[in-house]
Image: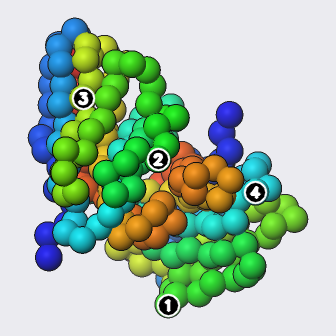
Amino acid sequence: DAGVIQSPRHEVTEMGQEVTLRCKLISGHNSLFWYRQTMMRGLELLIYFNNNVPIDDSGMPEDRFSAKMPNASFSTLKIQPSEPRDSAVYFCASSLFGSTDTQYFGPGTRLTVL
Amino acid sequence: DQQVKQNSPSLSVQEGRISILNCDYTNSMFDYFLWYKKYPAEGPTFLISISSIKDKNEDGRFTVFLNKSAKHLSLHIVPSQPGDSAVYFCAASSPSNTGKLIFGQGTTLQVKP
């Protein structure tokens, strides 16, 4: 069975450009999480959804970040406009139900904003 | 404010010895704790967890200990193997915080053959 799929794996863009990261959940999972990993702050939760509904978006840095679940198996994280401080590895994870259920992480997208 | 702290960025041990990774937390409302393991260029994978009603949970070579009064948990790996070399994250959650996981910054473990 396929795990969590993220695309692209690497993204290099220039400051001011729009960036869209994509995530496909494991089939049957109801919860979706977006994390960001940086050297300074470690692994931090940006937002999570249960059954396509955002439950906690308190980790979203600012209005430049937005996340959607257009359907039960797919999510996007958009940064517009991007800034160099957004450079990080972004992980998507899914679980059967809820944040304390085992979360399965994707391989991550390494974003570099020049 | 870092609610979950892993104060040792790195740890090096010899194959066959015990590895002890430590984690401290500040929020007394945390009631569920987990360890995740991460290899380079991969996402973290779940390793072991413990509820606050227990003080120990064991799974093969991995044991997690929880000391609620000290707000401290540790992961013991015995015996350590070179394949255990990875970054280890501890995480915690509380029902009063939407149940979301708060991760530490990670400890890089190197097990030398």
Q: Check disc 4 and report the residue beneath it.
A: B29
Q: CA distance from mark 1 to mark 3?
A: 41 Å
Residue B20 sits in which quadrant? bottom right
The residue type indicated by label 4 comes to Met
Q: Check disc 2 and report the residue beneath it.
A: A55
Determine whether label 2 and label 4 are within 8 Å by CB.
no
| Chain of the residue on which disc 2 is drawn | A
Which mark identifies residue A109? none
Which one is closest to the eye, mark 2 or mark 1? Answer: 2
- In the rendered image, is residue B109 in sight? no
Q: Nearer the viewer, residue B51 or A74?
A: A74
Instruction: Sort mark 4 into few (<14), some (14-19) or many (20+) by Cα contacts within 10 Å.
Output: few
Query: How far from the left and from the top, in percent, is residue B13?
Result: 53, 67
Query: How far from the left and from the top, in percent, is residue A24?
Result: 17, 54
Q: Do badges 2 and 1 share one subunit?
A: no
Please say if B74 is above or below B11.
Answer: below
Q: Check disc 3 and report the residue beneath it.
A: A78
The residue type indicated by label 3 comes to Lys
Which one is closest to the eye, mark 1 or mark 3? Answer: 3
